[in-house]
Image (tube, rainbow, N blue to C red):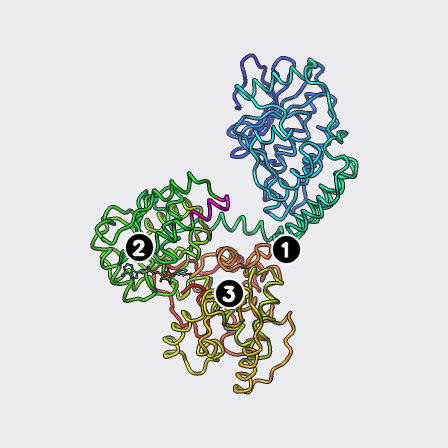
Amino acid sequence: MSAPAEGCVQDAAQTSAVAYALHGDIAVATVNNPPVNALSLAVRSGLLAAIGRSLADPQVRALVIVGGGSTFVAGADINDFGKPYDEPTLYTIIDTLMASPKPVIAAIHGTAFGGGLELALACQWRIASPDAQIGQPEVKLGLMPGGGGTQWWPRMAGPAVALEVTTSGNPVAALQAHEWGVIDRIAEGTLLEDALAMAQDVVGGALPARDLTESTDRIRDIDPALFDDFRKKNARKWKGQLAPWKIVDCVEAACRLSFDEGFRLEKDAFSECERSYQSRSLIHLFFAERAAGKLPDVTAAPAPVATVGVVGAGTMGAGIAMSFANAGLRVTLLDSSDEALARGLKTITGNYATSVSRGSMPQARADAALACISATTNDAALADADLIVEAVFEDLAIKQSVFRRLDAVAKPGAILATNTSTLDVDAIAGVTSRPQSVLGLHFFSPANVMRLLEVVRGPRTGAATLATAMAVARKLRKIAVVSGNAYGFIGNRILAAYGREADFLLEEGATPWQIDRVLTEFGFPMGLFAMRDMAGLDVIWRIRQQENTTRPAHLRYSPIADRICEMGRFGQKTSRGYYLYDGRTPIPDPEIESLIVGVSAELGIARRDIPDAEILQRLLCAMANEGARLLDEGVALRAGDIDLVYVNGYGFPATRGGPMWWAREAGLASIRDAVAAYHRQHGDYWTPSPLLARAAAAGGDWDAAPSRGCAPAHTLPHPPTTTGSAQDA
Ligand code: NAI
């Protein structure tokens, strides 16, 4: 794209970010800012200069703006959001383009997203390659179109399309955008040549001059119910967000106000979103996701993985097999009996049928994925597998015997992974002859849906094994977060800490429904006790019974969860748990309230009204303090990794950025002081993490006080959970 077309005159005085060339009486500005031609200051300056030159040159009759390399201007530089913008800003360029007496044509290939698209929308005409994509993805970062997107889209494509595109943030194919009227022409040959031909049509009058800011065809007489209905339809989805609400306001305004008035409103709304905690949080998670894949001490190249074995065709094994099959990998599913295999395969076919009937997967893709899965009861069928994931019962002896068998049949170099939630990965690796090829791959349920994958690095896990696992996770489109081999890894360890605190709050005066309401009002999709009821209370009860034999007597322990299980109430599966259930709807139960009140009396704890704010503060501080310990112990590598685990695996609201980000936003010094006060009041569990104190003293950022990093060299501690509740044990 950047190569000049034949017969063009190139200018020696071009800026490095934007080249300027003449093709007869048409000027071409080519943006060259690899890899994605982001709208950096150099690009903005270069574009403004190119527009100025084309206007000043009497020989030039029109200007074409095109991207060099693989794409048009893909968008703004995300690092720039929330900081002061240097001139020329995108606004200056848009104003100049809109005031230009000479026509400007945007020639789009690759992607034109966000500010990149708005640059094109401010041009009088747009031509695109048939495989190009456009879109306004700002909402995914808690932002909104800020360069006129909410004003152009309704004028070009109508308000219904505008609402969908700008609030979903999803990309739109150029062909679709052409049908809607946002792209004027689809290139049939070389994009630049077709763009030059289009420019000739414009200057020759074949395409008549037009001013879309004055066009009201698509925005006249719009029923206001369109916007109210759209708000109502999405109210649940947008809970806790700011940007989508602002977007709807601006699109609605576009149908009532002049372009200039609407654009002014959009500018104000954009800067409000840019200053919001929602956008800071979502941008933090964007960068955290990119950082999570990087392991500073692992330089080994990943080995190819084409064939996979999955051992255990239960809840997790079935979902794990689907994850691999969806990515086109061949999967052999093994269980100990034909009945168990048949059950697993029934789950898998049922899940695909549901996806197809809901329209979330085309039949052909479901068929192709199913064709990737074969089933066996014979270990020898795993001999070819590059990777084998074990998902049998959560029992060390059973898992060790499975790993001995796998070690005997797996080919040399094959990776053996365990999906354990609580067991010591090294104790599993230790029964094989290849501990360097063993690691944990902790999928979340449902494994074919949940994006999070904790990659557990045992003390003997080799660098190549880890590199391969990370590459496989990318293939599965999972967010892989590396965890050290410590009890509960990252996610369940924090769940245990804040679950314990929630249990203590019950004893002190709260009810399960008050705590759950506080959490859902904060943004969790479900409260902690409702979640326990959904997961099943009996599984963790059994684990607790084992752990209670070794629990130090001086540590506070809440018997409430055990008492509930002793009543045969195991949650949704028995229609009774912390709540009563009508179908899946939880109903507060006076019987549970009296049980809790009875326990408080037994323990001599005077119940009090606990304010919602105190409940929230105690639960979130417990998460952050435990997260800081994980960093200090080297179980987690970065604060951002912990946030990714919490947002993607445990329902922490993305708009709050995760527990570590929440603490940073609240001020680490204030969290340190709160934790110290809880420690004085409630004892040992609240021992402040040394990292929390260091980070607070070092300026209030976790990164300012480096942790030890993910420690591969020794086995990390495996403390008991006491009253904790492993989400999935
Ligand atoms: P499950 O009970 O649904 O399935 C276990 C399967 O393993 C059964 O089909 C069983 O027949 C098979 N199996 C047992 N012993 C076997 C052997 N020796 N050889 C071959 N197959 C054998 O259990 P689920 O829930 O799928 O859990 C499996 C593992 O995944 C456990 O380690 C659990 O802690 C872990 N996990 C569970 C999550 C959940 O939400 N259920 C989430 C994350 C991890």
In the rendered image, the quadrant that contains the C terminus is bottom left
Q: Is residue 317 left or right of residue 77?
A: left
Q: Which residues are magenta?
A: 352-360
Look at label 2 and name its amino acid. Answer: Leu
Depicted 384 relative to depicted 524: above or below? above
Look at label 3 and name its amino acid. Answer: Met
Label 1, label 2: how many angstroms apart (C-alpha)? 41 Å
Beta carbon at label 1 within 8 Å of ligand 1 = no
Q: Which mark is residue 531?
A: 3
Q: Secondary structure at mark 2?
A: helix
* Mark 2, residue position: 341
Q: How many marks?
A: 3
Q: Is residue 680 visible?
A: no
User: Does the stretch in magenta take in 88?
Assistant: no
Q: Secondary structure at mark 1?
A: loop
Q: Which callout, 1 or 2, points to the residue nearer the camera? A: 2
Q: Main secondary structure of the magenta part?
A: helix
Q: Is residue 336 left or right of residue 272?
A: left
Q: Nearer the viewer, residue 649 or 37?
A: 649
Look at label 1 and name its amino acid. Answer: Lys
The residue under the point 34% across, 43% down is 372
The residue under the point 52% across, 83% down is 599
Label 3, label 1: how many angstroms apart (C-alpha)? 19 Å
